[in-house]
């Protein structure tokens, strides 16, 4: 599934990191701004060496936005709750090239929350670097 570009490791490693985050105390206007969220997610993923294949978003009425990114390495998502100033972020990347924890940190930097709760789950098998 994944291509670990930029390394000499084999393609399709069954290993990955899944970062789950909850940010609170975020400006509700940012959490309802679909274009800002798309741009912030793309920038964070690019800067953390993930490969964005496609991105879609849905703005809900009366408020809230979901943004999904299909990655060569797997996926990323954001689900906003402007009425609570909160957002769920999920970034899962296979292999060792992309840095999902950095992506979440960059999103937190862009959103300036008052509270951040993250959890990283190591999935699959971890293969030693070549």
Image: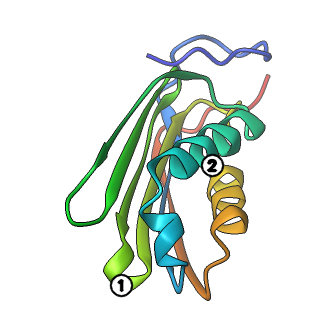
| x and y, in percent, of residue 64 in the image | 31, 63
In this rendering, the answer to whether 88 lies above or below 55 is below
Q: Which one is nearer the viewer's eye here, 114 or 7?
A: 114
Q: Residue at x 57, y 51 (%)?
A: 36
Q: Residues within 10 Å of mark 2 (few under 14, many from 20)?
A: some
Which of the image's four quarters has the N terminus? top left
Q: Is residue 6 left or right of residue 113?
A: right
Task: Tell me if 53 is positioned left or right of 99 in this view.
Answer: left
Mark 1 burial class by Cα count in 10 Å: few <14, some 14-19, many 20+? few
For residue 81, what is the image quadrant?
bottom left
Tags 2 and 1 touching, CB below 8 Å: no
Mark-to-mark CA distance, 2 and 1: 20 Å
Q: Which mark is residue 40?
A: 2
Which numbered circle lies on residue 84? 1
Image coords of residue 89 (percent x, y): 45, 59
| Secondary-structure class at tag 2 | helix
Residue at 46%, 76% (x, y): give it: 28
In the depicted structure, whether residue 7 falls above or below residue 116: above
């Amino acid at each position: 599934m994944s291509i670990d570009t930029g390394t000499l490791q084999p393609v399709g490693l069954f290993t990955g990191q899944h970062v789950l985050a909850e940010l609170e105390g975020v400006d509700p206007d940012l959490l309802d701004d679909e274009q800002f969220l798309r741009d912030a997610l793309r920038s964070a993923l690019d800067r953390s060496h993930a490969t964005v294949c496609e991105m879609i978003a849905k703005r809900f009425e009366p408020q809230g936005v979901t943004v999904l990114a299909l990655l060569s390495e797997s996926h990323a998502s954001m689900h906003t709750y402007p009425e609570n100033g909160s957002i769920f972020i999920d970034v899962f990347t296979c292999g060792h090239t992309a840095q999902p924890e950095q992506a979440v940190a960059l999103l937190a930097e862009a959103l300036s929350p008052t509270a951040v709760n993250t959890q990283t789950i190591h999935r699959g098998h971890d293969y030693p670097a070549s």
